[in-house]
Amino acid sequence: MKDIFFNAADPAHIRREKQKARELRQTQWWKRKRSSGICYYCRLKFPPDELTMDHLVPLARGGRTTKGNVVPCCKECNSRKNYLLPIEWQEYLETIRHETE
């Protein structure tokens, strides 16, 4: 994967948003969201408790912990996506979706 250069968000912003994420993970909304067991990125099925919360726009890039910015995903996709923005990971998603078909 190509090198990604960006100015990281303020550490205080990241701390605040991580705390919000911890709180959001405890809500019924999040539990329902991940209950399908489907990873948002690779579309494979996992036990719901194995899915992680991923920020579409990463916290390190100024993203926020809002219902519109978080999705359930498997640990492998979460690790591979890292700090990529939607436009940056689209090509990667196309590749893995074709592999699973």
Image (cartoon, helix red, strand yellow):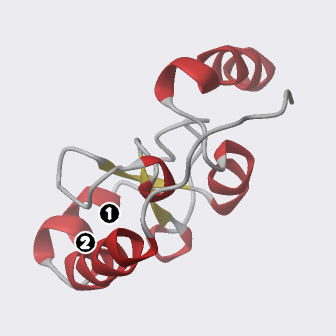
Quarter of the image with the N terminus is top right
**SS category of the residue bearing label 2:** helix
x then y, percent, for residue 50: 56, 72
Q: Which residue is nearer to you in this view: 81 or 32?
A: 81
1 above or below 56? above
x then y, percent, for residue 76: 73, 55
Q: Which residue is mark 2?
A: 31
Looking at the image, residue 97 sits to the left or right of residue 54; the answer is: right
x then y, percent, for residue 58: 46, 50
Quarter of the image with the C terminus is top right
89 above or below 33? above
**SS category of the residue bearing label 1:** loop
**Label for residue 50?**
none
Q: Which residue is mark 1?
A: 35
Q: Quadrant of residue 32?
A: bottom left
Foreground: disc 2 or disc 1: 2
Looking at the image, residue 3 sits to the left or right of residue 7; the answer is: right
Q: Quadrant of residue 12?
A: bottom left
x then y, percent, for residue 60: 50, 56
Residue at the spot 66% in from the left edge and 62% down from the top edge: 75
Q: Quadrant of residue 79?
A: bottom right
Going by the numbered disc 1, the residue's amino acid type is Ser
Whether pointer 2 and pointer 1 mark residues with C-beta atoms closer than 8 Å, the reply is: yes
Q: Which residue is nearer to you in this view: 82 or 45?
A: 82
Residue at the spot 62% in from the left edge and 26% down from the top edge: 89
Q: Spatial distance from mark 2 to mark 1, Cα to Cα?
A: 6 Å
Going by the numbered disc 2, the residue's amino acid type is Lys
Q: Which residue is nearer to you in this view: 29 or 20?
A: 20
